[in-house]
Amino acid sequence: MTDVVARYLTLGLRLGRHVDGLVDAYYGPAELSEAVAGEEMPAARELVAEADALAADLERSDLEPQRRGWLGDQIGGLRASAGVVAGEEISYAEEVQRCYGVSPEPVSEETYRETHARLDELLPGDGSLLERYDAWRSGRRVPAGRMIPALTDLVGLLRARTRLLLDLPRGEALVLEEVRDEPWWAFNYYLGDLHSRVVLNADTLTTPFDLVGLAAHECYPGHHTEHAVKEQRLIRDGGRLEEAIQLVPTPQAVVSEGIAETGLDLLLDGELTREIEDVFEAHGLEDDFGLALEVDRARRPIRGLGVDAALIIHEHGGTTAEAQAFVERWGLRTPEQAAQSVRFVTDPTWRAYAVTYSAGQELCSAYVGDDPARLRTLLTEQVRVADLLAARA
């Protein structure tokens, strides 16, 4: 392990003591995490200086250019986050740009209106579009007791398809659990040693089609696949220990969420659709997969709804009530669902993170297209946000 890599891991662990949840996962050398845990809490200003010094030393290192660039992006995200913790006054938009390498672009009102018009066609009937959309989703809700059994079978299907895309490391595995009272719908806790714990928030309305998306996003070919494959190829085989820490406020998250949002499209075909419908039937779940897929695709242009809610509050000085009303109107959410969305973008750890879903999906989808080799590249190599932006351009 090189000096700059050890210092990068240490910087991330130290900053994680200031911001709960900033370190999404750590499975690097135990002596580093034990040393940081035993230290006196460093001041945030010290971490700003540490990040600046590390960035300068990285530029003088003999690491290969792509690896050096990737690490530099990560250190830049940590530097921005440390500055916010230390009290530096920057705008929300600048915080997002400096952490993630992308700008928080608002969705146009025209796009929202076009999306509503398409959903109006897909979900005809009496009542407002919100009432029809909510009734359609609520009528397909998966009971809490059936979520994990059905999800387990769907994960198995997608794992088999992912193995056709690339070799999964021997010994990779995951467990699935229900949780409650969280600001998010689902989460992958990557544990290291090729294992994940994937949890589903049972308080959130979940449909059979949602379970498919969850299986793809959190498991195969999404987060679990990416972390396990990179742990094997980049850390164990390649010695790139910088991959042994997952940090929330960094460009790494944009690529990771983009992979998770993009993979299902590449795997899905007629045969897999039939297999998914068989799982629904086996678990007594009713859903029109074709219609659900059309609705999902119709909503993709407004994937940045959470970013808009964050901009209302953090950039334009609006209230949480105003942001919630915006989410209810344009996102077709009930007050309870909108409140959950606003809770996410006002959480100190996650408020800037909302951009990773929309920007990640846009960039990775454009990069991958219908080429499996491109998805394999994202799953196996250190791809930078700058690489995705250049490919799109």
Image (cartoon, rainbow, N blue to C red):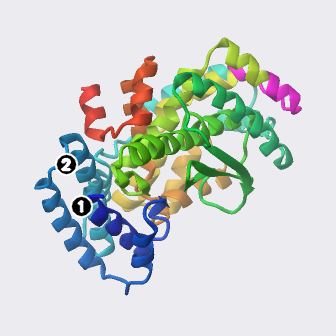
The residue lying toward the viewer, choosing from 116 and 291, is 291
Bounds of the magenta span?
278-290
Q: Residue 261: percent from the left, percent from the top?
A: 51, 35
The mark nearer the N terminus, 2 or 1, is 1
Q: Is residue 97 magenta?
A: no
Name the kind of residue labelled 2 in the image.
Answer: Leu
Q: Residue 193: percent from the left, percent from the top?
A: 55, 52
Name the quadrant of the C terminus: top left
* SS category of the residue bearing label 2: loop
Q: Quadrant of residue 5?
A: bottom left
Name the kind of residue labelled 1 in the image.
Answer: Val
Relative vertical location of residue 273 with respect to residue 244 in this rendering, above or below: above
Q: Is residue 283 magenta?
A: yes
Question: Mark 2, residues whose alpha carbon is within 10 Å: few (<14), some, or many (≥20)?
Answer: some
Residue 16 appearing in the image:
no
Question: Mark 1, residues whose alpha carbon is within 10 Å: few (<14), some, or many (≥20)?
Answer: some
Residue 251 appearing in the image:
yes
- State the residue lying farthest toward the left: 60
Q: Residue at x 48, y 57 (%)?
A: 345
Relative vertical location of residue 128 with respect to residue 246 in this rendering, above or below: above
Q: Residue 116: percent from the left, percent from the top?
A: 56, 29
**Marks 1 and 2: in contact by CB < 8 Å?**
yes
In the image, 320: left or right of 176? left
Q: Residue at x 49, y 40 (%)?
A: 229
In the image, 295: left or right of 124? left
- The residue tagged 2 is 63
- The residue tagged 1 is 4
Q: Residue at x 66, y 21 (%)?
A: 122
Please state the total of marks drawn on the protein image: 2
